[in-house]
Image (spheres, helix red, strand yellow):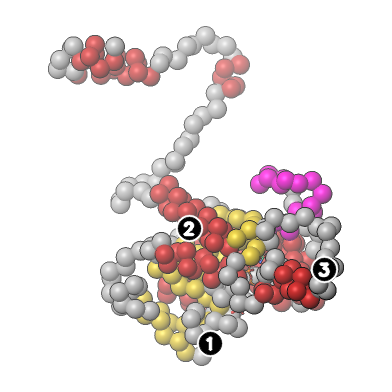
Amino acid sequence: MSRAGAELSILFSPGCVQLLQEEVLVQGPKVLVTGATGLLGRAVCREFQAGGWTVVGTGYRRARPRFLYCDLTDEDGVRRLLHQFKPDLIVHCAAERRPDVVERLADATVQLNVNATGTLAKEAALCGALLLYISTDYVFDGRNPPYGEDDAPNPLNMYGRSKLEGEREVLRHCPGSVILRVPVLFGEVESVAESAVTSLWLKVQEGTEDSCLLDHCYQRFPTDTRDVAAVCRKLAERAKQLTEQPAGSAPRPINCQLNCSRLELLNLSVQPKPFMSAITDCLWPFTPDKRWRQTVFH
Ligand code: NAP
């Protein structure tokens, strides 16, 4: 990493990562992106870098040389990474997301999609980082679209079940986290087969001159990874604005409007006074120029 762009130097040694804080002049907020070598993670890293964040991306088999190696199923490694980098935000993209592979490698999938997510959530809660967990539309069974946040999930396959379990781990260990369910993705691919959307193009190429065989049963809603990445950054920045407290002050709720419906049922005949006239009455004794009342509010 260049000194101009970021303030952390990164040392690699086999199987472990060391981050050394060089200078105290941390400029942007810090984000840790898991799955940074993947289809979505790459776009997320680019988006946060362009937005002035200090970004550390982790990968696994494809990690080096551009990203940090971290096996997320290694709890100690994850702990070390978070304690050393101390991110403000974690965007958790890493997962096994190929449904057929998941059916074959069920145990390894649970390790990554569920247990590693639980570890990250615990560590995020400990270090006070906001956790943004990328989930999937496959938590639903597809029988009654469109789905909202409050609709009951009912995954049809192991992949969907593991991502739903991941969501539950996140909420159990790190309340206040953000869960973003996304549909099938496409974007800047390393090979055409990397995305289920661009791989259709392969099938078209493989067909004869005027026909190729594709199923038209499933309806999908392809989404550009750059759009998802932009949503991640803007969500994080919005959450940060909402949660930032002046130094040394106690945390306060953002909006704790009270629902008065039960009180209203009692019909106590108390008409609330309009705020403008009520506050004018309160301040009236303190106004040096009593004409203020007329000039300002009437
Ligand atoms: P992807 O391209 O398959 O990338 C998976 C990432 O996980 C890679 O960076 C991989 O690292 C990393 N990984 C695998 N095993 C790991 C381990 N043991 N420790 C640490 N990292 C490990 O996935 P994606 O398409 O970017 O998906 C991102 C997220 O979006 C996932 O949570 C997925 O469930 C969700 N999603 C994706 C789609 C889609 O169409 N792609 C649709 C809906 C939801 P290496 O490659 O370096 O090994």
Q: Which residue is mark 1?
A: 15
Q: Is residue 216 above or below residue 207?
A: above
Mark 3 or mark 2, earlier in chain: 3
| Amino acid, disc 2 | Arg
Residue 98 in percent (x, y) is at 73, 71
Q: Nearer the viewer, residue 207 or 109?
A: 207
Image: magenta residue range = 136-151
Q: Quadrant of ligand 1?
A: bottom right
Mark 1 or mark 3, earlier in chain: 1
Q: Nearer the viewer, residue 203 or 65?
A: 203
| Amino acid, disc 1 | Gly
| Amino acid, disc 3 | Asp
Q: Which residue is mark 2?
A: 233
Q: Residue at x 61, y 73 (%)?
A: 189
| Quadrant in the picture for the N terminus | bottom left
Mark 2 and 1 residues: CB-CB less than 8 Å, in contact? no
Residue 74 in percent (x, y) is at 59, 79
Question: What secondary structure is marked by label 3?
Answer: loop
Q: Which residue is mark 3?
A: 210
